[in-house]
């Protein structure tokens, strides 16, 4: 089996590759070749070094998609994207990579299949950003996609293409709408959603963190480990069960900031909680007000996708996977 | 005011141009220049001949969109499309015209605005085909778009682009999702939906017509006159009232074949009804089973879009507009 991961140097990409390194048949069979690409050259786990081919590419460049697909990977996992803030700031870059780059990839698959039969599994990282306020309190599987960012628009367009290209037997596609990933490992970043992770990760490491919104703010979360699980499950799932509606919101937890803090106290005691400083920021509050708060994800659950059931679990995943099981400080 | 109509030789396009000919300020002001384009050279009404520029174009050709937009029309009405059956039969042609052609148009507007400020009104003919079965009995304004044809996919993609380009202040766009137009004037055609019109139009002209489905089959209709009304209303509507969700299902009537036939009898007596021959066709029945039956269109109604309230009216519109007020036979 040949596997191509586009966006392999990103947070989810790296964790997915590590997971494949731990359990090399997790995508449904032995991998003979693993193509790992991103805008920066990705790393391969040591035990996969002999089958991995790692390369820096720009998906928006003509010919790149064709070159990647010329290897005829059986599974294509497409995680690459210009993130929301950058796609908003740089209109051309967002459309060139997120929409046109993805479209070129789908077209390269179609062209390859016209040379000789070829129908790979195509797993696309979509986003909660395909939805735009106002929302019902709980968003169901049949709610419409009215994105309020160019990033969300680009994701929603690729979702439509994936359904149509699947229906036309060009590929066997699925769109995985990711919840906000929490706790994101690494340093605090400038993303508007960063604080949801910062107020847990930094205190768990004995550092202060800033909370820019009120405690009752609610959002939809899953751990990085769950995110990896969506993709490994999507690689082996019988997609005929999904039918023509190929894009699914993934399971997660609806939680308020207060829920996060209460879970932090239950898991790690009162000391980390004391490191959260409340510094209200009207801009961030305004952005977050436009985000989805809760979902009903019956279809994804019925297809066997899973996530954490409590916020305590989300925190424990971080302690296990990032902190070697120990709370710092 | 300069107005560009793309797809001006089609059924809705011709009726729209005729309507402008009847009432030259119906789009909200005096028109100094009317650009009419289509794959075949459109005709202009006699009283508009001195302001009309009529041209045959291929929207999928590089440079065509830029040339059209270089005239800086204040209103762009985009009706052009490869129809459903052809977009399904010819994958490249459908995507090239319906998706890429429309995208090139939006991009040409953006490029023109980068030279000097420019933000036209952009009115897009979208379709009931953005929806795909299974449906609720009545489709609401927030139901998701999961098209089951490439045509519907292409329309749904352009809808997303129109919302985003509007949000980004590149244009002031609106997507008009047309019901099935009934009674279509002209000859019976091979479209799967043709019978909905054929069983009225042909008997009203004293000709036999074939009904390939059962009488209880239900669908969503409006007259050609209503279709023209959607576009003239969209030209003058305050789009700030529409908000960021720019694509609207238009008002129509949910009616069964039996409702159509009963209306025909009420309006034209028993003789035309006797000209309907029932010849069941499983293929057509299968296609029609995938179509939407009924809508709740609260948003469009609240914005002042209108259509017929009874099927009798739909039939009378045809008798008035196509038959000079007289039932033939």
Image (cartoon, coloured by chain):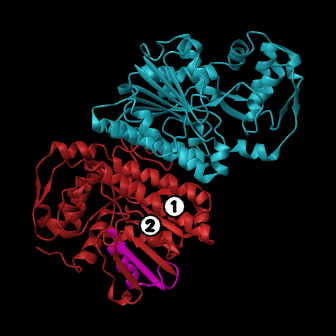
Chain colours: A red, B cyan
Question: Label 1 to label 2, Cα distance in Å?
Answer: 8 Å
Depth check, front residue: B234 or A27:
B234
| Residue B241, position as x, y percentages in the image | 37, 25
Task: Kindly indicate whether the residue at mark 2 contacts the one at mark 1 (C-beta within 8 angstroms).
Answer: yes
In this rendering, position of residue A127 left or right of residue A39: right
Residue A148 numbered mark, or none: none
- The residue at which mark 1 appears reads as A107
Q: In the picture shown, does residue A305 fall above or below B11?
A: below
Q: Is residue A172 visible?
A: no
In this rendering, position of residue B97 left or right of residue A86: right
In this rendering, position of residue B211 left or right of residue A156: right
Q: Quadrant of residue A208?
A: bottom left
Q: Is residue B214 visible?
A: yes
- The residue at which mark 2 appears reads as A65
Question: What's drawn in magenta, residue-wise?
Answer: A12-37
Q: Tag 1, which secondary structure?
A: helix
| Residue A97, position as x, y percentages in the image | 36, 58
Q: In the picture shown, does residue B304 fall above or below A324?
A: above
Q: In the picture shown, does residue B97 fall above or below B207?
A: below
Taking the spot 45% from the left edge, 63% from the top edge, the residue there is: A124
Kindly identify which chain the residue marked by label 1 belongs to.
A
């Amino acid at each position: 089996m040949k596997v191509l991961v586009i966006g392999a140097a990103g947070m989810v990409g790296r964790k997915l590759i590590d997971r494949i390194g731990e359990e090399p048949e997790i995508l449904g069979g032995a991998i003979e070749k693993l193509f790992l690409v991103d805008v920066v050259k990705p790393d391969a786990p040591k035990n996969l070094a002999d089958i991995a081919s790692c390369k820096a590419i720009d998906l928006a460049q003509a010919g790149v998609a064709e070159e990647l697909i010329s290897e005829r990977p059986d599974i294509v996992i497409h995680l690459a994207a210009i993130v929301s803030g950058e796609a908003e700031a740089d209109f051309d870059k967002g459309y060139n990579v997120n929409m046109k780059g993805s479209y070129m990839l789908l077209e390269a698959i179609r062209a390859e299949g016209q040379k000789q039969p070829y129908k790979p599994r195509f797993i696309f990282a979509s986003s909660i950003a395909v939805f735009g306020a106002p929302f019902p309190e709980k968003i169901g599987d049949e709610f419409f996609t009215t994105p309020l960012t160019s990033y969300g628009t680009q994701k929603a367009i690729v979702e439509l293409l994936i359904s149509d290209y699947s229906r036309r037997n060009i590929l066997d596609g699925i769109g995985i709408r990711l919840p906000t990933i929490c706790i994101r490992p690494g340093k605090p970043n400038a993303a508007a959603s960063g604080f949801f992770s910062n107020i847990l990760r930094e205190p768990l490491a004995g550092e202060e963190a800033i909370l820019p919104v009120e405690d009752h703010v609610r959002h939809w979360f899953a751990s990085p480990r769950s995110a990896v699980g969506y993709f490994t499950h999507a690689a082996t799932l019988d997609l005929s069960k999904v039918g023509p509606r190929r894009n699914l919101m993934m399971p997660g937890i609806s939680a308020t900031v207060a829920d996060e803090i209460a879970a932090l106290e239950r898991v790690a005691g009162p000391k980390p909680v004391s490191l959260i400083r409340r510094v209200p920021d009207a801009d961030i509050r305004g952005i977050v007000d436009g985000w989805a708060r809760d979902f009903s994800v019956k279809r994804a659950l019925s297809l066997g996708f899973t996530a954490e059931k409590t916020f305590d679990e989300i925190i424990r995943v971080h302690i296990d996977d990032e902190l070697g099981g120990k709370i710092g400080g």
